[in-house]
Amino acid sequence: MLKIYNTLTRKKEPFQPRVAGKVGMYVCGMTVYDYCHIGHARVMVVFDTVARYFRYQGYELTYVRNITDIDDKIIQRAIENGEDYGKLTERFIDAMHEDERALAVLPPDLEPRATRSIDDIIAMIKTLVDKDLAYVGANGDVFYAVNKFKDYGRLSGKNLDDLQAGERVDVDLAKRNPMDFVLWKMAKANEPAWDSPWGLGRPGWHIECSAMATCCLGNHFDIHGGGMDLQFPHHENEIAQSEGATGEKFVNLWMHNGFVRVDDEKMSKSLGNFFTVREVLKKYRPEIIRFFILTSHYRSPLNYSDESLNDAKAGLDRFYIALRDALPDDKIPENFIVLDDYKVRFEQAMDDDFNTPEALAVLFGLANELNKAKKHKPENKIALAATLKYLGSLLGILQNGPDGWLKGNVTLNVHNLLTATHVDAPELIEGSGVSEEIVDQQIQDRIAAKKAKDWALADKIRNDLKDQGVILEDSPDGTTSWRRE
RNA sequence: GGCUGCGUAGCAAAAUGGUUAUGCAGUGGCCUGCAAAGCCAUCUACGGCGGUUCGAUUCCGCCCGCAGCCUCCA
């Protein structure tokens, strides 16, 4: 029985789809004026893992993740760059998709964009104005009248009095209440603008998501997700807008992922302590990033450091060493059956609010069993390895060829991402450092030295390679395999 | 100030009212020409103070510390 923590009730709840067998899930995506950082990567990976698990459980999932492609920061950046704002957002949408592919994040089913949803946005604002939940302010902007919505603050556990007591924003004289937020913003000269009943302008951020979510999934749907920081005011405002406009319940279950931190501080643009995905990819392969994200529970904070990433690499190496030489062609055989014991434990972990650290612990147990089977029970080897690789696929990991992984190879599309060239065909390229040919040649020389019992030469070859980051491993049958540190 | 949430061994990170988490690192052993990898064993835990209980890291209260939100933010 799948249980999910609901921010609305602050409890884990048994998951009950609105319609049997179907799930509608909306996740707040990126505002596209810059490259994705590791915090964005976390959202993508977390909800991708959630989506994979729903599908694995047999649900018919509609996964929507929007793109905010019009907003103050976008306009500002476009001006700074002297670039058309549409060109700018196209560029960063492409970049985001590249990052996504690198991290083995499957594309959402629908990816609505604010600028393509203007009619729906205007319609929703109009309804809110007609219902007297919104008003035109002194400056012509349209605002939501927060005190007209009685449940305002329910999601974030705040109430209007407390909020006003801690007010940090300059009071906007155009608003009736300082907490009121903008639905439609009048355009300044030369800003991108759309026609509306209130004049030329553009939508506020919060209304975009309400309109896009409702449009793609209906007035009432199952799950809405996003980062913790969106809880207030963004998601609170979405509830006020959508429920205000439709009179129906908006969302059953709210999921919020924790932050990525650097030195125990939130990673963010404003603090400037962020690492972009492509920056990190210069140093670590994408599966390491994904694995790193999965090593902590999605609601916990995740501290980013070289040490954590190195640990993640070491953990993955352990899996790939176990998988090495375990499956014919490194493929899961057809009509294989997942080992029930591990499957059950894996599902128990995932059913408990997507407990990926626990699920990984199950996989480590499996790797241990596989290592033992290789030596003592070869007849079990394939079933164990296939189960490991299969369960790994549900988390979006362990799908590389073990030998290639251990030799530090990386796919071409990831490699090219670093130079921002668009490439779709994944081709393997060699890991950096001493070439495979040289390593293979050295291994042959060393085997000859070993035959001649010239241990000094054999050890010298091994040490020299070690200095270049290549580790040799002799197996009992006289062959030598190798991997990069 | 208000509202959330967190505090687990050297590091990372789960579960749990009484029993091995797990990974990395350390130590000892097996294996190996020696290593590496693997296997086996093993050392480091539950912020502090009270309460409930036969028994609490786990439940409750208080305190201390940390983070987030209350402005745009994943």
Image (tube, grey):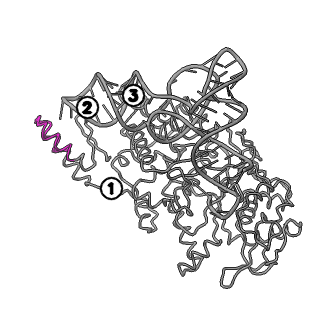
Residue nearest the observer in this picture, A328 or A398: A398
The answer to whether residue A223 is above or below residue A148 is above
Residue A422 in the image: x percent, y percent? 46, 68
Residue flagged by tag 3: what amino acid is it? Lys
Q: Chain of mark 1?
A: A
Neighbor class of circle 3 (other Cα within 10 Å; few <14, some 14-19, many 20+) is: some
Query: Is residue A250 placed above or below A93 in the rendered structure?
Result: above
* Residue A445 showing in the rendered view: yes
Highlighted range, magenta: A443-464
Quickly name the residue at label 2: A476
Does residue A24 appear in this view?
no
User: Which numbered marker is on residue A241?
Assistant: none
Same chain for the residues under marks 3 and 2 in the image: yes
According to the picture, the residue beneath numbered tag 3 turns out to be: A372
Q: Compare marks 3 and 2 and give the one earlier in the sequence.
A: 3
Quadrant in which the N terminus of chain A is drawn: top right
The residue pinned by badge 1 equals A430
Q: Return the chain for callout 2.
A: A
Helix, strand or loop at label 3? It is helix
Q: CA distance from mark 3 to mark 1?
A: 30 Å
